[in-house]
Image (cartoon, rainbow, N blue to C red):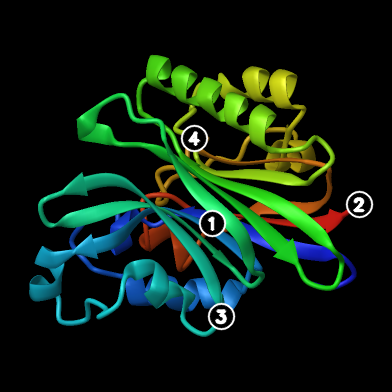
Amino acid sequence: MTNGSFKILTYNIHKGFSATNLRFILHEIKYSLQYINADIVFLQEIHGERAISNNRFVDWPNNRQFEFLADQVWHHYAYGKNAIYKSGHHGNAILSKYPFIEWENINVSLFKSASRSLLHGIIQIPGVDQRIHVICVHLGLFEQERERQLATLVKRINSHIPTNEPLIIAGDFNDWRGRAEYLLHHNLGVQEAFKITHGTYARTFPAWLPVLSMDRIYYRDLKIVSCNYLKGQPWRHLSDHIPLLAEFRLI
């Protein structure tokens, strides 16, 4: 952390496969994430366990995907299962250069075929005696489903996060119609980082020609320094989403 500022990145990595599912590109994702070198990384669709792929791909890592990506850069991480199947499971992960005080995965699934959860961690920033709440989300594809999941998110924040402690909510909201803004802003007082800095939501899907605003970074009790989407190479061929990168400063 420099002068009280830190960078966060959110990215749906599509389980480490290219958008067409033809190539396993987790190693390229790792290199690209390390090059950006954000302090806290919010990841969606990341494998915890996947037995079949261990046999199918010679470059499949021996450890879990979030451990493989964290490597020597992010020494602290949390993982929450979203979808569980016979060959393994995938979900959300948060990688951090700063230690977690605690973390919890909250199940918000409405359908077994599309399990969803909210991964809520509390990070301690060393040397400044500051806790930051970070929530990694991946919401459902259907509007009614998302409404109930957002209601759970609001309830969780109001019951577990003091209003004077910084909060970041980041991930794949699947909210291409922009319906989440009213609920989150009016119930939580959060703002969306890209919209505040650019006047509109970032278009992050599909990566090769982004037209839909799927990925968001909401925050409160922090000062936004910058927020950008990482378009172009190599990002356009890694996943079906492109990442959002934001810099914040402690107030």
Instruction: Return the residue at label 4.
Output: 173
Among the 4 quarters of the image, the one containing residue 230? bottom right
Element type at mark 1: loop
The answer to which of marks 2 and 3 sits earlier in the sequence is 3
Identify the disc placed on residue 209: none
| Mark 2 crowd level (few <14, some 14–19, many ≥20, 10 Å Cα) | few
Instruction: Return the residue at label 2.
Output: 251
Front: mark 4 or 3 = 3
Q: For the point 73% across and 18% down, which residue is it?
A: 186
Instruction: Return the residue at label 3.
Output: 73
The answer to which of marks 2 and 4 sits earlier in the sequence is 4
In this rendering, does residue 85 appear at all? yes
Q: For the point 69% across and 42% down, which residue is it?
A: 194
| Disc 2/disc 1 C-alpha distance (Å) | 30 Å
Identified by mark 4, the residue type is: Phe
Q: Quadrant of the N terminus?
A: bottom right
Front: mark 2 or 1 = 2
Identified by mark 1, the residue type is: Lys
Q: For the point 52% across and 25% down, which residue is it?
A: 152
Residue 125 vs 142, above or below: the answer is below
| Disc 2/disc 3 C-alpha distance (Å) | 26 Å
Residue 202 locus on image (x, y percent): 60, 41
Element type at mark 3: loop
